[in-house]
Image (cartoon, rainbow, N blue to C red):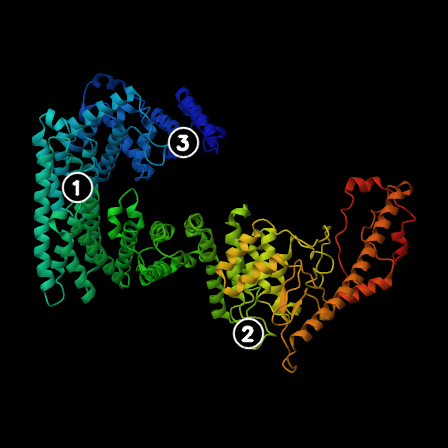
Amino acid sequence: DRIVSMTLDKEYDVAVQAIKLLTLVLQSSEEVLTAEDCENVYHLVYSAHRPVAVAAGEFLYKKLFSRRDTEDDGILKRRGRQSPNANLVKTLVFFFLESELHEHAAYLVDSMWDCATDLLKDWECMNSLLLEEPLNGEEPLTDRQESALIEIMLCTIRQAAECHPPVGRGTGKRVLTAKEKKTQLDDRTKITELFAVALPQLLAKYSVDAEKVTNLLQLPQYFDLEIYTTGRLEKHLDALLRQIRDIVEKHTDIDVLEACSKTYHALCNEEFTIFNRVDIARSQLIDELADKFNRLLEDFLQEGEEPDEDDAYQVLSTLKRITAFHNAHDLSRWDLFGCNYKLLKTGIENGDMPEQIVIHALQCTHYVILWQLAKVTESSSTKEDLLRLKKQMRVFCQICQHYLTNVNTAVKEQAFTILCDVLMIFSHQIMTGGRDMLEPLVYTPDSSLQSELLSFILDHVFIDQDDDNNSADGQQDDEASKIEALHKRRNLLAAFCKLIVYTVVEMNTAADIFKQYMKYYNDYGDIIKETMSKTRQIDKIQCAKTLILSLQQLFNEMIQENGYNFDRSSPTFSGIKELARRFALTFGLDQLKTREAIAMLHKDGIEFAFKEPNPQGESHPPLNLAFLDILSEFSSKLLRQDKRTVYVYLEKFMTFQMSLRREDVWLPLMSYRNSLLAGGDDDTMSVISGISSRGSTVRNKKTKPATGKRKVPEGRTFLILKLTRESSSSDSMWLNREQSMHTPVMMQTPQLTSTIMREPKRLRPDENYMGVYPMQPEHHQAPLDYNTQVTWMLAQRQQEEAARQQQERAAMNYVKLRSNLQHAIRRGTSLMEDDEEPIVEDVMMSSEGRIEDLNEGMDFDTMDIDLPPSKNRRERTELKPDFFDPASIMDESV
């Protein structure tokens, strides 16, 4: 049991060795392994890891196919249905059907290819089982078994002709050795000689079975077509062409018709002498289909009444055949654009065209456009050809745009997919590779078309699964259908995102896509994230603008739903913040590469937050101020000097009264300012100037004394100019204020410098960090003249400077006292014992009067100051308690 369980080990090497060990056990004694143990190994032949699958295939072959009865030795030389491989082929078919993995026959064949080559290459036996009548007493194959045998036979032929594992198993095509190439040529010769004769018979026998015919029609792709001439097999080629023609006339299934089209394409190879014979047969077939379609369409469109169902079926079946052939063959000489245009135009005007006719007419017209583009690209085309193609392409885009609003979902999806392909093909990318002559064909969608494409995505992709089930008339009850529907929606989203990545549509249209990142992460998260990455590679700044625009759209939607008095702890607002955090993570760790984009993101966010003033007056916050709480998620991506620049820009939108507000509605502004102040490089990170909210911790950092000249950090001037270029003309004061921050700035209105404190009379100017706010005059006061304003401002600054110096002296005394206490503690280590409690690090100031003065000046009950790092645990254990510790003397409990 342990060895059997090891076959499922996550380490593939372990699993391979376990399967090989079980194979040895099987050879030595079959009774050791139970049927259940063997079944656990059987299903591994469908594993995506080829070594595991090959080992399991060898185990399967040893168990079911290697035994031969003694009576079989006398008939080893028999061939066909009477060969010893006949029963083994049937066993293989039974195993394949019992495994219930009918779409993975190629995996089963590849697993057994190395150990059962002779069995899998016995195509004569397989062909005999399909064509010959069963022997006396032999049970014939059922219809299901015949379908499985044809599928297995096709997979073995493909494996022999291509000599590489199926898709999903293996690293791709490898270079074949000389021996493998010779084996490949011999196998293709054997396949062609056998099935060139047998294929027309197989098609005649199973002509009405769509599944069998679809698989059989793929065999000519692996033929060596030269053998038709060298082996004098032309009559069998004619028989094959007749059978294909009959199948086209009998079937309307898309898979069957496309298989016929691919078979004609494989046989119509100009390198071989059979080309003329096949081309004539193909042309005759297309002539009949085109004439029939034009005749049916003329009668179908001339009827004044509603279209007859029989006529509609005839038009649809003929159109399906033409569309299937136009996919692989150039049918330009039959001029199919005109008749399809009439059909689509009538459908727009009347609105009663059957949906399948519209879908296939759109697809056929799409093929017409593409084949004409290939023709003018490969050959020397005239100007008239380019103009005709341009006109047809523009008209076709307009038709597709009309069908985007069709009532039928399938028609809209087809129109959207084709329209995205056409816009992608005829974008500016068409001129790459030295094809400047195709410039007249470049087509850029207008804003209305971009809007309709985006609306389609929002209405048909970003929907709940239940909504999609209801729209599909209840046909998506099982899981397989749900997965298929999700796959279709992913393809639609990928088609539109491709237009964004290649700048076919404006990048800001991606905002409606990006805002769905969290809500539909499981379904489309990988597509949206890849789109973000590609757009950032194209234009970092525009991508950042798009990201902030998506957050603004979500914020506006929340406002429309809940009003401006929403709860910031609500799930909706928290979801927007979480989305902003995810967006911030996508910028990576290299802040230098994204500094301009991040700064522009903050600029747009600040402008949005202050865009709508409160109608109740300046005493109330702007309507979008809460957006700053979302914007703070990107503050950590700013460089230290860029935080300073963004902070200065923020001050331009603030008034003096805003800096004094402490109500809850102003918390977004306070938290955003704190996020910009955190990690700043200016002297304002001191004990006094950093006070922004009650109970906050202020860090006192040792900095060099400011000199008269301050060097602007490298890169900041460029960033300021960059932001200024995007802003209004008044933004030019950024650079001037940054470079002359220590010089008093005299504006036309009185200016005050301020930190956020509760009492304006104790404000301290800090030219190194804080911005300059315009002082709003009270309504009941008369305006002052300029000299009076300057005198009043200088007096205010002198008072504030005196208060600041007094507070700094108090802080210095406190630091000195603490330092003395620490030195005293260190000197008394010899008097300490091991069983005492650790030393208390935060001690009170000795002068209660100074504490009261300091608290009064700062309007705080307590003030936290970061002190030098404390002793680590090892150092603490080495210290002994000092019974004369001054801290214990000052403790109230002593």
Residue underneath mark 1: 260
Disc 3 residue type (three-letter): Val
Cα distance between the residues tagged 1 and 2: 70 Å
**Nearer the viewer's eye, disc 1 or disc 2?**
2
| Sequence-first disc among 3 and 2 | 3
Q: Quadrant of residue 741?
A: bottom right
Quadrant of the image for the C terminus?
bottom right
Residue underneath mark 3: 41
Return the mark for residue 614. Answer: 2
Helix, strand or loop status at disc 1: helix
Return the mark for residue 318. Answer: none
Residue 389 position in % (x across, y down): 19, 52
Helix, strand or loop status at disc 2: loop
Q: Nearer the viewer, residue 205 or 32?
A: 205
Residue 277 position in % (x across, y down): 8, 35
Residue 4 position in % (x across, y down): 46, 30
Relative to 284, does residue 305 appear above or below in the rendering? below
Helix, strand or loop status at disc 3: helix
| Sequence-first disc among 1 and 3 | 3
